[in-house]
Image (tube, helix red, strand yellow):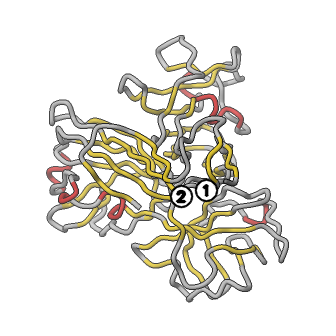
Amino acid sequence: MKNIVPALATSLLLIGGGSCGFAQTAATVPVGVVSVTIQASQNGTSHAITPISAPLYGPAEITGQNLGKITGVSASTITNANGAWSAGALAQLGSPYFVRIKSGNASGHLLRITSNTATDLTVANQGVDLTTLGIVVGASGDSYEIVKGETLLTLFGTPDDGVTGGTLTAFNAQQTDKVLVNDTTGAMLSYYYDTTASSWKRVGSGANQNTLPIAPSSGIFYYRIAQSSLVLSFVGTIPDTSLKRILAVNGSSIVSTYFPVDMTLSTLGFQSLTGWRKLGDVGVTLATTDRVVFKHSTGAIFSAYYEVASSSWKRVGSGGTLNSQVIPAGSAVMVTRFGTGSPQVWERAMPYSLAAQ
């Protein structure tokens, strides 16, 4: 759930739970607010770039069981024999739902529902066979939760909400806001609000993109042309499991930092992925290192790469060690990889503990 408000701060407020941070304990699954500032353009002629994410999620208010046990699994289907869902209700345009696995080896996966029957949820598995994730089925099997996602329209709204829109001509002249996001196929594309069509559009397509799903694990790079900032305030449930995200081994993905706390570059753990290309590996040059691009504390976007010789993160163009570089809550990072092979699962451990009151 989201509100756009005029403010100049990024913050986390836990409702009924106290502060949440590294190595801290909070109330069990507290509800909170994360506010993320979209920075203003300094001159109105060049964009200010802000990586953002919507890390909180709202439980689904649906017919049937939004919480339950997984009684069956196939390559792209999750089954609850007692689901009692309305056929097709969880895959409506403009109202995306995701199934979040809450326990077991696959705990932390967020999978978008593309169709459903009364008992089966077909999901976008991003090329990974769900039967390979170690999901345990049956009465004592792993549990799931169905959660509500965002769309381009529900996340950013219209010019009435502060978005700078315009015609395609204005977009091409760098006179509109634009957002860079991975679409439902994983491709990284640009979108803008078309004031002629009164809808969000993708560059190169005339189709209405208002309903493009945005997962809680997705990140966005927002390019702001107006000389005024926007603040998105997200209200929802604090994540209570690790995050598992399917990433391509070749290409770029914008990834949510997900948890509503600040974190450091080294604790994101991308360097632990199998085949992560590091400077010093055989055949790897600086230009072909896998890297992470994110917002520096001084306001610049920069690339970082992992140097195997000293096991430290470095910034391209600088010799300084950046293991402890802070990435703020509600931000996002772009992961660019140059490897080969099948998609991989990246896991981000939950950076706080939850205890019953």
Q: Quadrant of the N terminus?
A: bottom left
**Is residue 326 depicted above or below 57 in this figure?**
above
Kindly identify the amino acid type of the residue bearing the numbered disc 1: Val
Find numbered disc 2 in the image and state the secondary structure of the residue it sits on.
strand
Kindly identify the amino acid type of the residue bearing the numbered disc 2: Thr
**Is residue 326 depicted above or below 179 in this figure?**
above
Q: Which residue is mark 2?
A: 237
Q: Which residue is mark 1?
A: 29
Q: Position of residue 11 (x, y in %)?
A: 41, 40
The quadrant in which residue 84 appears is bottom right
Labelled disc at residue 123: none
Find numbered disc 1 in the image and state the secondary structure of the residue it sits on.
loop
Q: Which residue is at 27% across, 42% downward?
A: 7
Q: Nearer the viewer, residue 251 or 313?
A: 313
Bin the neighbour count of mark 1 within 10 Å (Cα to Cα): few under 14, some 14-19, many 20 and up.
Answer: some
The numbered mark, 2 or 1, whose residue comes first in the sequence reads 1
**Is residue 63 depicted above or below 293 in this figure?**
below
Bin the neighbour count of mark 2 within 10 Å (Cα to Cα): few under 14, some 14-19, many 20 and up.
Answer: some
Residue 269 seen in the current view: no
Q: Position of residue 253 (x, y in %)?
A: 52, 46
Q: Position of residue 325 (x, y in %)?
A: 53, 24
Residue 87 seen in the current view: yes
For marks 2 and 1, give the CA distance.
Answer: 6 Å
Q: Nearer the viewer, residue 7 or 340?
A: 7
Q: Which residue is at 56% across, 45% downward?
A: 259
Number of on-image labels: 2
The residue at the far front in this view is 357
Please indicate whether residue 200 sits to the left or right of residue 123 in the image. Answer: left
Please indicate whether residue 307 sits to the left or right of residue 52 in the image. Answer: right
Q: Position of residue 250 (x, y in %)?
A: 59, 43
Q: Which residue is at 31% across, 42% downward?
A: 38
CB-based contact (under 8 Å), mark 2 and mark 1: yes
